[in-house]
Structures are given as structure tokens and as C-alpha cells.
Amino acid sequence: MNDSSRRRFGLRRPVVAPSLSALIIAIVASLGHPSAVAAERPHVLMIFTDDQGYHDVGCYGSEIPTPQIDRLAAEGLRFTQFYAASSICTPSRYGLLTGRYAHRSDDGLTGALMFLSDADADRGIRPSEETYVARLRDAGYRTALVGKWHLGHGDAKFWPTRHGFDSFFGHTGGCVDFFTLRYGNRPDWYRGRRLVEPEGYATDVITHEAVNVIRDAAGSDRPLHLLVSYNAPHFGKGWNGELKTTENVMQPKPEDLRRVAEIEDPLRRAFAAKVVGMDAGIGKLLDTLDDVGIADDTLVIFMTDHGGDPDYGGANEPFRGEKATLFEGGIRVPAVVRWPGRIAPGTTTDAVAAAVDWYPTLLEAVGVREPAKRSDGEPVDGRSILPVLLGESDGEPRELVWRTGSHAELGRSSWAAARSDDWKWVRPPDTDGMLFDLASDPGETTDVTEKHPDVASRLERLATE
């Protein structure tokens, strides 16, 4: 690699070993400057949104204005073939944090955990299921989760602070009322393990807390990993006092509705209002990084947990399918990464990548040994995409697998899918599998199983065995 390429991606030239005296001077100087540590081990801000589809972000072609997310894309790298770990909330989060497919989880977390379900009261991410966050904390990072958890509730063993997070401020269930911050009429907002009753709109409450975490960490000699898990633009979980039951309801702020008044469809407009309110919050996070002087030392990741739900205003064009399906619309998601001095600004990649890849990628980026394995030696399912981020690779052929579980309460049946290079095999509920060539048919309109039976059989085995 020549010098200009190294400068472009922030890589160092080979250096001659310094003299002993020069080395001592350098070490002493670095001890007095925490920012020198941050330059080697970046702060990591991951922004993870809820039920936001491929067509729900401005820089992906949406009519919804998202200038702050678009700013990240303009200053970093935008993926066009990035995949969620699942098309459902709980397994998507499991895959992100563990780097492993949810069908490998101890509790079979292939469906959404239900906050009021007796069957789900003792299910969640188990103590033995290691997260990349725990590895970062062991490496000296200060770690914080602000927002949605949805990987177990009630028992302390499921708590974020048992899985690598130094601090937690948010809710454990799949959704809350955006104005009362309760699950229907039941409290579900915590600081650590203590129930609290914050005032405000959920998106703003999450943003305000995340801003404070960034400010508190700026003066520390420990690098920060902050996961901001917005519950927007997911529907709210309201309470119907007359019927004495919870209800799913879109809950945009009136002032945000006015910002998207030109959108005619009322459902889409309500959804868009939640998106623009969240985008404004993301802008506050980015501004805070600038204000405290750590923006240049921070790796920022934006992605969504799975495809949008058209029943609540989400959109996934130009792809087929939606949330809870394994067509592209359910799992191909927006993903943008900014890392000043390392990632070239204004770039786009067609490399195939997935949320399970963040486990090895982040650990490699901060210098943790054996990033592709858990501390018990077991491999993760993701693989490092650091070369893609740094512009050193266009990506290698990938094999990815997805499975969802049946869920009678939500009226869902199980799906299975696999991708290998440009081939995609999908088996919807109660039907035979279908094979698609995504290179020529990204909309998954034409089943080519009869033309390529051997490929279909191989991907079926990959997905189901």
C-alpha cells in the first residue's frame, strides 16, 4: 500500500524501532494524555433503531427526511447489502450482541419475548452466552446501554449489567408507551435494577440520557462503548382503560407530525414523525461528540434491527417482504459507519455483511486477541468486516443463515433462509423452499429452483441443519 493510501485510511507506515530514551519519553507522554489511548482504541457509539426498514432512511431513497443519518453516510460508509441477525426483535438483538445465530441460543430465542407471557418469564440471554460488550469491558472499556433491551426481563440473570454493560437505563420489554414510558399500565423503565419513572417522550428521554453518558465519559481515561437502542419508530404499547388491556398504537409527537405534514397517508405520516424525531436525537448525539472533542476518536455505527412493518407505517422498497419474514425486506437493513481518519467519507459498499459481524469486527478494531472466538474457545458466526470498513477489501463471498420460530400469540409461523454468495434460499411457512439469484433478481420475484436444484438443496441443508 502506498503512502497516499495509508493516509486515506489512517494507517501507519512501517517504522524503525526507536531508541530506548525516545521510547521512554513517548510512553511517559502518552500516560499524561488520555486522548492518545482513545486514538488507539476508539470510542464506539452504536445506534440501533427499531422496526425501521430499508426505505425508511433518506439516504436509502426514502421520502422521510433523515438529515442526521444522511450526515453519517456523507462522512462515512453506507452499506447496500447489510443484514440484520433476524427479522424479529429479540433474535436480532441476540445475534448483534453475541455474534451467534439465535437458533444456537440456550433458550431458543428465535421469536419475540413477550413481557406479559408466563411462558417467557424465565427465558432470555443466559449467563454463559458471552457478548462482545463483555469482551470490550474486559479490555478496559466503559460500557453503557440506553434504551431497549428485550433479551429477558424480571430475573437478574437476564439483565444487561450481567452481560457486559456497566450501566443500563431503559426498558426490558419489546415496547413501551412513548408518553408514559410504561408497558401498557405496568412500569418497565429502569436505571440499573431500580424501577424509575422518567418524564418525557421516550425518544427524547433516551437521547438525553445518551448525551449525558457521552459527556461523562469524555474526561475519562477509559474508552466508551455506548449502545443507544431507540424504541422508535416501533409502535407504542398503550393502555386501553375502558377495555382494561394493552393496545398497539402509533404515538408521534405533535410537533414532529407537523414536520412531515406533506405525507398524505396518516399511518405513514405518524411513522415518519417518529423517524424524524429520532433523527433529530441522533443529531444531538453527534453534536455532543463534537462538543466534548471526541468525534474524531469515535467509531459511530447506525443500523436497524430488521425490516419495517407496513401495518404500522414502515416500508422496505425495493425489496419483497417485511418484518418477521425472511425475504429481503425483512432482513436487509440500512447500515452506516463513520470513523474519521479510518473510513473514507462519502463511500458506498456492496459487500455482504451482517449484524453478527460486529462481534469480531469491533474486537479486532480495538486489538482484542482471538476476536472470532468467545473466551471459551467456541467460534462466533460472524466474521470481521474491518477490511471492508477500511477500504482494503470489497468483501468476500458470504454464507449467512436465518431461522425464525413459530409464535401463536403473534400469529407467526417459522421461516428458514440462507444466503451463499448471490444465491438466496427462502422457505416461508407451510410452503416449499424457493431459490433466488439476488444479483439479477434482488426483489425475489422469480423462483429458479428448477433450474438450479443442486444449489437449492445445498442452501436448504445450510439453513436447516
Image (spheres, rainbow, N blue to C red):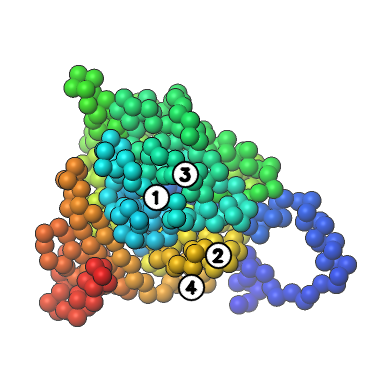
Residue 110 falls left or right of residue 196: left
Disc 3 marks which amino acid? Answer: Pro
Disc 1 marks which amino acid? Answer: Ile
Numbered disc in front, either 4 or 3: 3
Element class at badge 1: loop
Depth check: 306 or 144 in front? 144
Residue that numbered label 1 is attached to:
125
Q: Which tag, 2 or 4, sits closer to the chain's start?
A: 2
Looking at the image, is 175 positioned above or below residue 360? above
Depth check: 447 or 141 in front? 141
Residue that numbered label 3 is attached to:
160
Q: Are marks 2 and 4 in contact (CB under 8 Å)?
A: no
Residues under labels 1 and 3: Cα distance?
A: 9 Å
Q: Which tag, 2 or 1, sits closer to the chain's start?
A: 1
Residue that numbered label 2 is attached to:
364
Q: Which tag, 2 or 3, sits closer to the chain's start?
A: 3
Residues under labels 4 and 3: Cα distance?
A: 34 Å
Residue sitting at 63 percent across and 38 percent down? 216
Q: Which tag, 1 or 4, sits closer to the chain's start?
A: 1
Disc 2 marks which amino acid? Answer: Glu
Check disc 2: other Cα within 10 Å, few if <14, some if 14-19, many if 20+: some
Residues under labels 1 and 4: Cα distance?
A: 34 Å
Looking at the image, is 77 positioned above or below residue 18? above
Residue 30 falls left or right of residue 98: right
Point out residue 94 in the picture as x, y percentages from the top left corner: 38, 53
Name the quadrant of the C terminus: bottom left
Residue that numbered label 4 is attached to:
393
Q: Which tag, 4 or 3, sits closer to the chain's start?
A: 3
Element class at badge 3: helix
